[in-house]
């Protein structure tokens, strides 16, 4: 899963960074792994195309940006994958789709067929009809742990991973992983290489350490809790690290497992 801050730089697809990740995905595909990409960036691209300098405050405007940006984002992926001989496929979906048994089964079947065909599915939330992850992530003091709120496709990627019985979910953002403290407050903050389970203490720490994207670390840990609870391992890592997917699959010390 690629967050907005990995995909977009100055309103454009960060071609070098995303291109490196696309190459990594194709290498994994060729090595026999089934890979599905969940990518944000539609709102960010739409903003530039509509001449907006700052993220609109109105939800409807962000949905409009996504409607403009998604086609261009997918155009980038279609070209980038095709230049490496892989056919990309676009699937836009909502949390409601995943919560409905029939629709979730349809999604699973579609994705399975695409993978059999050698394609790489590229998923995003259908922001124009669903705003579950378009609103900024907030985990209010005392909020129901059973009903977490996600942002920037974090929750969507976890639910897709669960629907596919995925072995591994890799969430790439612009931070190295979960840190011991907020680096802005505590410069000695260290990356945590492995977190045995996502407990309340880890969630509380993440809430204080997050500035990245609309999802942030709290949203990522909530998503990690959802996925790991169903048997999918999760790695949170920096999408700007070259060949990050190869490093993770090789078991190198990268990000937070
Ligand atoms: N699905 C959205 C996108 O692709 C999430 C990012 C956002 O909230 O800006 O742009």
Image (cartoon, grey):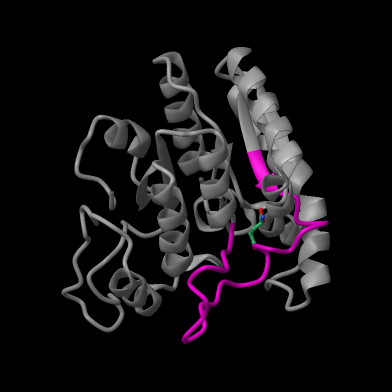
Expressed as whole percent of the image width and height from the top left, the position of residue 36 reads 55, 32
Residue 239 visible in the current orientation: no
* Residue at position x 40%, y 73% in the image: 210
Residue interval drawn in magenta = 123-152
Horizontal relation, residue 234 to residue 252: left or right: right
Q: Is residue 86 visible?
A: yes
Looking at the image, the residue that sits furthest to the bottom is 141
Prevailing SS of the magenta stretch:
loop
Residue 238, image x and y in percent? 36, 51
Q: Is residue 179 above or below residue 23?
A: below
**Nearest the eye: 150 or 61:** 150
Question: Residue 12, how many percent across, how many down?
Answer: 63, 51
128 drawn magenta: yes
Answer with the quarter of the image where residue 176 lies. bottom left
- Total residue callouts: 0
Q: Quadrant of ligand 1?
A: bottom right
**Residue sticking out furthest to the left:** 188
The foreground one among 179 and 229 is: 229
Task: Tell me, yes or no, whether the highlighted magenta stretch contains residue 182.
Answer: no
Residue at image position (68%, 53%) is: 95
Is 161 left, or right, of 58 in this rendering? left
- At 25% from the left and 46% from the top, the residue drawn is 254
Quarter occupied by residue 148: bottom right
């Amino acid at each position: 899963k690629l967050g907005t801050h990995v995909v977009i730089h100055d309103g454009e697809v960060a071609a070098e960074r995303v291109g490196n990740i696309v190459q990594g995905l194709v290498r994994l595909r060729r090595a026999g792994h089934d890979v599905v990409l969940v990518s944000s960036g539609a709102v960010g691209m739409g903003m530039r195309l509509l001449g907006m300098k700052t993220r609109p405050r109105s939800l409807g405007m962000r949905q409009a940006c996504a409607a403009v940006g998604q086609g261009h984002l997918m155009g980038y992926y279609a070209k980038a994958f095709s230049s490496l001989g892989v056919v990309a496929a676009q699937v836009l979906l909502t949390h409601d789709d995943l919560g409905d048994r029939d629709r979730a089964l349809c999604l699973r079947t579609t994705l399975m067929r695409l993978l059999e065909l050698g394609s790489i599915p590229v998923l995003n939330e259908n922001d124009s009809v669903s705003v579950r992850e378009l609103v900024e992530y907030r985990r209010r003091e005392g909020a129901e742990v059973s009903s977490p709120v996600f942002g920037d496709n974090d929750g969507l990627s976890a639910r897709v991973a669960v629907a596919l019985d995925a072995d591994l979910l890799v969430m790439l953002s612009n931070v190295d992983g979960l840190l011991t403290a907020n680096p802005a407050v505590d410069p000695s903050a260290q990356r945590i290489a492995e977190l045995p389970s996502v407990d309340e203490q880890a969630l509380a720490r993440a809430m204080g350490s997050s500035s990245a994207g609309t999802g942030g670390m709290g949203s990522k840990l909530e998503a990690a809790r959802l996925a790991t609870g169903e048997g999918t391992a999760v790695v949170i890592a920096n999408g700007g690290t070259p060949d990050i997917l190869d490093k993770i699959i090789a078991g190198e010390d990268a990000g937070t497992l």
